Image (cartoon, grey):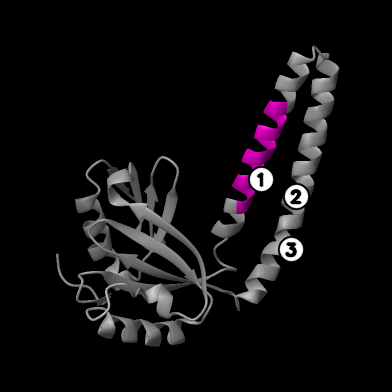
Amino acid sequence: MSEPNILKDTNNRYHWIYELPMKKSFFLLFEVWKVLCIGALIFFIINILISLILKEGSQNILEMFGVSLLCLGIMLVLSIPAYYIVIKANNGMYTVLFEMDDNGIDHIQIKTDKANALDLLTVFVGVAGKNRTTTAAGLLSSTGSSLYSRFVDVRKIKAYKAKNLIILKSRFINNQVYVNDEDFDFVYEFITERCENATAESY
């Protein structure tokens, strides 16, 4: 397994930054829709249970289903303009920092452009050996959300090389790892070798 064009610090931790055009990839919007659908389903099930306990008729259950469906539809429609507001706020790009070692991988959204992030990341790699408590995300002045996957918890790996995407599926976490073309094979092999409990599929 050859060394990639990814920054590696003295603690054997790999770091890279990926920029994803948000107008060409709607995965964030789909994630929001998934959460809304799950929330609506849970709300409906709770109301059915309450109706059964109170011995209300099937007509009331159908009415609740109609109201839940209507509310879900309204939220799904409203999420579309909200998504474009998020796109504008992020200058059309979803910029993410990945930090990977033998134990797992961290997916960290950063709210700065790729060029500035790479400059700061280069500084971090230079000082990491002197300060093990420092992280690349800590040096980036403005960070967003973070999602960490432990390799031991991963149960399924799906690789889409044409999309520069590796999906790590755990029991409660689905992590999306984006990698540039020249580094894809390295990262994929690194992950699959350490996810001993996972099955891997390539597309």
Which element type, helix, strand or loop, lies under badge 2?
Answer: helix
The residue segment tinted magenta is 32-46
Of residues 112 and 135, the one drawn nearer to the viewer in this rendering: 135
Q: The disc labelled 1 sits on which kind of residue?
A: Leu
**What kind of secondary structure does the magenta stretch mostly adopt?**
helix
Quadrant of res 48: top right
- Residue 120 in the image: above or below residue 50: below
Q: Is 21 left, or right, of 4 in this rendering?
A: right
Looking at the rendering, in which quadrant would you find the N terminus? bottom left
Tag 1 and tag 2, C-beta contact below 8 Å: yes
Tell me which label, 3 or 1, sits earlier in the chain: 1
Which element type, helix, strand or loop, lies under badge 1?
Answer: helix
Q: Position of residue 65 (x, y in %)?
A: 78, 29
- Residue 71 in the image: above or below residue 129: above
| Mark 1 burial class by Cα count in 10 Å: few <14, some 14-19, many 20+ | some
Which element type, helix, strand or loop, lies under badge 3?
Answer: helix
Q: Which mark is residue 36?
A: 1
Q: Position of residue 15 (x, y in %)?
A: 31, 72
Q: Is residue 39 magenta?
A: yes
Q: Is 113 left, or right, of 60 in this rendering?
A: left
Of residues 83 and 124, the one drawn nearer to the viewer in this rendering: 124
* Pointer 2 residue: 75
Residues at marks 3 and 2, CA–CA distance in whole angstroms: 11 Å
* Pointer 3 residue: 81
> Which mark is in front, 3 or 1?
1
Residues at marks 1 and 2, CA–CA distance in whole angstroms: 8 Å
| Mark 2 burial class by Cα count in 10 Å: few <14, some 14-19, many 20+ | some
Q: Residue at x 54, y 63 (%)?
A: 25
Q: Position of residue 18 (x, y in %)?
A: 42, 72
Q: Residue at x 32, y 70 (%)?
A: 181
